[in-house]
Image (cartoon, helix red, strand yellow):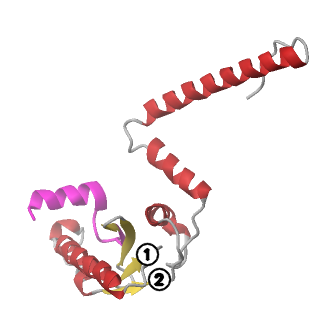
Amino acid sequence: MSAGTMEYIKDRYMGLADDLLMIYVPMHIGSHWYLMIVDIWEKKLMYLDSCKSDDAEETKRHKDQMREVAKYLGVLIRSRSFWKNKDAHPPLISEFDPEEATTGQMDCGVWVCQWMLNSHKWLDYDIEPIDASTRMRIATQLVLGPHNPLAASVTEKAVKFWNAEMVGNYKEEAAAGSVANGPRSSKRPSV
């Protein structure tokens, strides 16, 4: 890997490694998402899979993929450019052992996003439940977040759509009210 690539990764995604405690790596095989957490403090690779298969071969493939990524991260983290303290001893990430957490069955991709967004609130690696409000909150964060250059345009279009729906609903209610109950007040409904 070139020095320029390593600098880009450090500057864009990681920063200096001196205070690094965890690295979150969303993993994808086929149509399934799971999460690897490189826990620097505990010196382990956490395998977090919300829909873990009973197939031992599939689990082995996931853990093998984790080990490959850990080797790559190990190369990155050993680079002195990642450290403020040039005498620091980088952890040997490739030697960390994968461990599994207790999991339940739920949406894998949504769960990976949920875990990465909220892991700072949790004390362990156990699975947090996913429901419709979680899905909507994550979708909203992804669409309206500062990382999305189209967020302002999406908001503008959503407001226009909402206004059009409200006007349409008001007109329907006014028409139905004038037929069934006589003339209605011209006062606009509160939103």
Q: Nearer the viewer, mark 2 or mark 1?
A: 1
Q: Residue at x 50, y 62 (%)?
A: 114
Disc 2 marks a residue whose amino acid type is Ala
Is residue 158 visible in this depiction of the protein?
A: yes
Does the segment drawn in magenta span residue 140? no
Q: Residue at x 24, y 67 (%)?
A: 84
Q: What residue do we see at 60% from left, 29% from top?
A: 162
The answer to whether the residues at label 2 and label 1 have Cβ atoms under 8 Å apart is: no
Relative to 156, does residue 81 appear above or below in the rendering?
Answer: below
Residue toward you, 28 or 69: 28
Q: Quarter of the image containing the C terminus?
A: top right
Q: Residue at x 55, y 52 (%)?
A: 137
Furthest residue in direction right, as rendered: 181
Task: Give the answer, above or below, for where 8 lies relative to 146.
Answer: below
Name the N-terminal-most of marks 2 and 1.
1
Range covered by the magenta-colored residues: 1-25
Q: CA distance from mark 2 to mark 1?
A: 8 Å
Q: Secondary structure at mark 1?
A: loop
Q: Which quadrant is the N terminus positioned in?
A: bottom left
| Residue beneath disc 1 | 49
Residue 59 pos. (x, y %) = 35, 82
- In the rendering, at what x and y percent does residue 19 appear? 35, 71
Q: Is residue 91 visible?
A: no
> Would you say 22 lies left or right of 93 here?
right
Rendered image quadrant of residue 87: bottom left
In this view, the residue in front, 87 or 32, is: 32
SS for callout 2? loop
What residue would you read off at disc 2?
101
Q: Is residue 184 above or below residue 16?
A: above
Q: Is residue 17 magenta?
A: yes
